Image: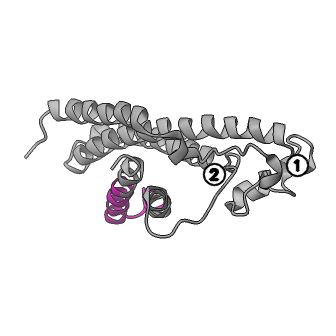
Amino acid sequence: MKRQPNSTLFYLILFSIIFCFNLNAQTEDELFNMIIPEDETEIDILPERMIFTQRLFWGHNGLFRKTGIAPLNLEMREKELKLRKIMLKTHQIIGYTTLLAMIAQGIIGGKLYNGESDLYETHKRMGKIVNFGYFTGAGLSLFSPPPLLNRKVRGLNSIKAHKILATIHFSAMLSTNYFSDRDRGAHKASAYTLFGSYAAAVLVFKF
């Protein structure tokens, strides 16, 4: 049974509505953990826990500290937190945009698997767009400055779920690209895993 043409527009509108609603509803504290103390002597201006990319560039002995690009002081950390906010907000926007591109890619891919071979080049181009959006968004998250505080919270929350799902969809993205011209079945399975885990990761902050 062929998908009706209007269904594509329906899904794009649906996710656009979710995107706009989620941007307005998301709290900055949940996303950025930007807690600035009144007395700077009460707390270190760098968190104890950082991901390896943050430690590599923004840690006490990170590249930006050693080169003098971002000296470690309170004034610079305040600027870094503002930069972090911009980078993570952009990461969020790109995430929704990439999700929309994935939906379009899935629809094109479905038609291609059903015999519409004239869509092959379109499918390839859309794949490049998805890859660009995905890895740009990932880079914004991985290389953003660290928060002021990064306390370990017990139990499952939206941030932990987002990180777990990120591990899954990152692996699925690599697998999807690897099997693109090697194994049609594995490529399709990886693409479904990628879309499902990526969609869940994007929407988990809201639901």
Given the image, on which type of amino acid does mark 2 rest?
Answer: Leu
Magenta range is 174-196
Q: Residue furthest bottom?
A: 154
Given the image, on which type of amino acid does mark 1 rest?
Answer: Arg
Tell me, for residue 65, which label it has, or none. 1
Q: Which residue lies at the image location 84% right of the left edge and 55% below the top edge?
A: 62
Camera-near label (1 vs 2) is 1
Tell me, for residue 7, which label it has, or none. none
Q: Locate residue 83, reporting x and y percent.
A: 68, 36
**Would you say the magenta stretch is mainly helix, strand or loop?**
helix
Describe residue 61's horizontal placement relative to residue 125 as left or right.
right
**Above-or-below relation of 122 to 193:** above
Residue 10 seen from this side? yes
| Residue under label 2 | 142
Q: Locate residue 150, reporting x and y percent.
A: 64, 58
Helix, strand or loop under label 1: helix
The foreground one among 78 and 5 is 78
Helix, strand or loop under label 2: helix
Q: Locate residue 42, reporting x and y percent.
A: 78, 54
Residue 121 seen from this side? no
